[in-house]
Image (spheres, coloured by chain):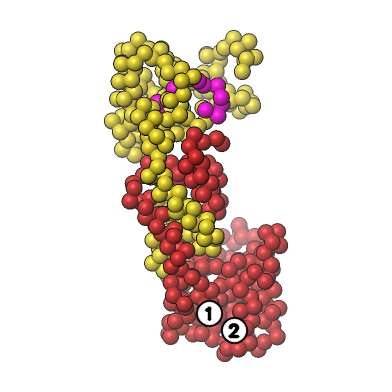
Chain colours: A red, B yellow
C-alpha cells in the first residue's frame, strides 16, 4: 500500500506493531484518530507513555503493578503459602474475577515455545524455584493453558519443582460448565471421567 | 472486567475507542505496549499526536493532506474537469493504486446511514454541488460502495447533480476479475450481462 502522506505511513507502521494488527486494520485506526476527537487522541497518546513510565513488574510475583510490589502480594489477608503459576497478567485477572482464589501468584511472562524462540530461561521460572526453596510454600497450582505450549511449560515447571517437598497441583481439566457431553472432545471427556469428583463437591461453590 | 491498576484500566478504555476494538483486544494491545520496547511505545504515542496536529483536510477535495491542498489537487498534470466521488481516504488510496485514474477526487467523508444517524448534511455534498455549479467540470464518477448505504448515497448525489449539465457516471458493476460465473450472485451477473462491453475493450488496460 502506498500512502499520500508520510505521517499516515508512519502512523500505520506504528499501529501495525500491535499484536494481530495488519496494515488495513492499522489504517482504519489511523483514520479514526484523524476524524476523531482531539481530546481522545491526546488521552490515548498520554496513556501509552504512562504504561511505560508508571507501571512495573512486581518484584515478588512479576504481576503488573504501580509500585514495587503488587496489591495481591501486599495484601496480608491472602495466603502466601499457596502459589498459582500463570502465563501472564490476563490469567491473573481471569482467576481473580472468579473470586475463588485467595493465595498468591507467580507470573511466568509467557510459555515455552521453541517455534517463536522462547525457552525456559526467558521465563520467570528460576525465581519460582528460588521462592519454593527458600520460602514456606505448601502448594503450587499450575494454571497454564492446556495447549501444547502450556502443557510443555507445566511439565517443565513440574520437573523443576519435583525435588522440593511442595504439593504440586494443576487446575482441573474437564467438561466446561454449560457444555454438552455429546460435543465434548474425547481427550477432555476421558480426563473428566478418570478424574471424577464426589458429587457433593459440585454443590458447594 | 476488573483491573488491578487504574493505569491499565484507562489504557484499556482508550484503546477500546478505536473502531472494532473491544475490551479483550484492547487489553492485548495494552499488555503488548507494557512488555514491548520503550522506543516503540514513544513512537506510537508521538505519531498519534502528530495525526491531529499535522494533518488536515484538503480545502478542495477533503482528502487528508499535510498542507492546505492535497498533492492530487496541486498536481497540474491531473485532469480537474473529471471528479471521482468517494467515501473516504481509503478509497482514494485504492483507486490511486490502480494507476488508471488521472482526474481529481471529492471525498464525502462517509455514507448516508440513518441507523447511525448520518444524514446528507454531515457529508461533503453541498461543497460538491458548489464545485459543479461554479467550476468547469465535465464528468462526475460515483465510486461508492455497492452496499445499501453506498447506493442510497449515490442516488442522493445523483439527484443533487442531475440539474447541472455534467456527465454522471458510476464505476462498473460486474463479475470480479478472477471470479467464476457459477458462484457469482444473480444481481451482479444480471448487471454484467445488461451492461456488457465490446470485447476489445478488455484487451487494453
Tell me the residue at 39%/30% (across/down): B69
In screen coordinates, is A186 left or right of B84? right
Quarter of the image where the C terminus of chain B is located: top right
Residue at coordinates 54% horizontally, 86% vertically from top-left? Answer: A81
User: In the image, is residue A148 above or below residue A70?
Assistant: above
In the picture, the disc for residue A60 is 1
Q: In this view, does A123 lie to the left or right of A46?
A: right
Report the residue at 46% width, 17% height from top: B79
Towards the viewer: A166 or A113: A113
* Circle 2 crowding by C-alpha within 10 Å: few under 14, some 14–19, many from 20: some
Mark 1 or mark 2, which has the lower sequence index?
A: 1
Q: Are marks 1 and 2 in contact (CB under 8 Å)?
A: yes
Assign a secondary structure to mark 2: helix
Q: Quadrant of residue B53?
A: top left
Q: Mark 2 lies on which chain?
A: A
Q: How far apart are marks 1 and 2 (CA)?
A: 9 Å
Looking at the picture, how far across and down is residue B179, in whole percent? 62, 27
Estimate the x, y position of residue B51 in percent, counting from the top left. Answer: 42, 44
**Residues drawn in magenta:** B96-108
**Label of residue A76 in the image:** none
Q: Position of residue A138 (x, y in %)?
A: 58, 87
Check residue A165 for magenta coloring: no
Residue at which label 2 appears = A131
Amino acid at each position: 500500500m502506498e500512502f499520500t502522506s508520510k505521517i499516515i505511513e508512519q502512523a500505520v507502521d506504528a499501529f501495525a506493531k500491535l499484536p494481530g494488527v495488519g496494515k488495513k486494520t492499522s489504517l482504519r485506526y489511523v483514520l479514526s484518530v484523524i476524524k476523531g476527537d482531539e481530546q481522545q487522541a491526546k488521552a490515548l497518546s498520554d496513556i501509552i507513555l504512562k504504561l511505560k513510565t508508571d507501571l512495573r513488574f512486581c518484584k515478588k510475583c512479576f504481576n503488573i503493578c504501580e509500585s514495587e510490589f503488587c496489591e495481591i502480594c501486599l495484601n496480608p489477608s491472602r495466603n502466601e503459602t499457596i502459589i498459582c503459576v500463570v502465563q501472564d497478567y490476563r490469567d491473573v485477572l481471569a482467576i481473580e474475577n472468579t473470586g475463588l482464589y485467595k493465595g498468591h501468584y507467580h507470573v511466568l511472562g509467557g510459555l515455552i515455545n521453541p517455534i517463536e524462540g522462547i525457552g525456559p530461561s526467558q521465563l520467570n521460572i528460576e525465581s519460582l524455584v528460588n521462592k519454593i526453596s527458600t520460602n514456606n510454600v505448601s502448594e503450587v497450582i499450575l494454571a497454564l493453558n492446556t495447549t501444547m505450549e502450556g502443557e510443555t511449560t507445566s511439565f517443565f515447571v513440574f520437573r523443576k519443582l519435583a525435588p522440593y517437598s511442595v504439593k504440586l497441583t494443576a487446575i482441573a481439566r474437564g467438561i466446561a460448565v454449560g457444555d454438552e457431553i455429546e460435543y465434548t472432545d474425547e481427550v477432555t471427556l476421558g480426563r473428566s471421567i478418570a478424574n471424577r469428583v464426589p458429587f457433593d463437591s459440585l454443590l458447594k461453590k
